[in-house]
Amino acid sequence: MNIQNDLKNVLKIFPKDKTELESQKIELALADDIKKKFALVDSLEDDLYRYAKMRQQDLQKIYSLKESLRDNIGISESRLKELSEVSSLLEGLKNKISQSAKELGINPKEVKFFTGIDSYLKSIKSIVKDFNGDVKEARKESKG
């Protein structure tokens, strides 16, 4: 009867071993899933840091461009002001030439450079108009 008792004892152990093996299979499967998720987290984290670095570089470029744009706006506005002052001076010279020519009884258009003043004045007006529009747009972009 010892053999029967021994056999019963052995059979009692078998289901436990089988259950433990299944439990180990489950644990191994879960461990594999966890490892895959960890790898995914690592990969996503690496991507986020890489894109954050690129984003910071892009932002730095934008800040630098905005600073350059503001400098450019300042210089452009200064030059436009100077151009407007020159335009006023040319307008005054044109009037003086016209007045002097009338007093002398000659046609102002016969005075050297008189006709050139008009073309310069038209050009200045066009330039001021065009550049004022450009500066206005640049100012808007430099703030945004």
Image (cartoon, grey):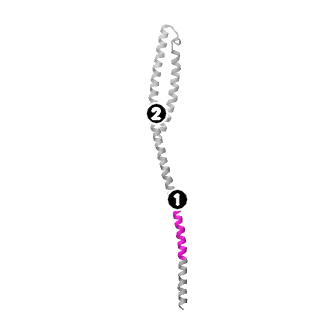
Closer mark to the observer between disc 2 and disc 1: 1
**Where residue 38 sits in the image (x, y, percent)?**
50, 61
| Secondary structure mainly formed by the magenta segment | helix
Amino acid under disc 2:
Asn
Q: Is residue 85 above or below residue 41?
A: above
Q: Residue at x 44, y 29 (%)?
A: 78
Nearest the viewer among 2 and 129 is: 2
Nearest the viewer among 27 and 120 is: 27
Membership of 108 in magenta stretch: no
Q: Is residue 88 above or below residue 130?
A: above
Magenta region: 19-40
Secondary element at image label 2: helix
**Where residue 5 sits in the image (x, y, percent)?**
53, 88
Residue under label 1, please give it. Answer: 40
Q: Quadrant of residue 15?
A: bottom right
Secondary element at image label 1: helix
**Where residue 20 sits in the image (x, y, percent)?**
53, 75
Q: Residue at x 53, y 78 (%)?
A: 17
**Where residue 87 sits in the image (x, y, percent)?**
47, 22
State the mark number for residue 72.
Answer: 2
Amino acid under disc 1:
Leu
Are circles 2 and 1 on residues that touch, CB within 8 Å?
no
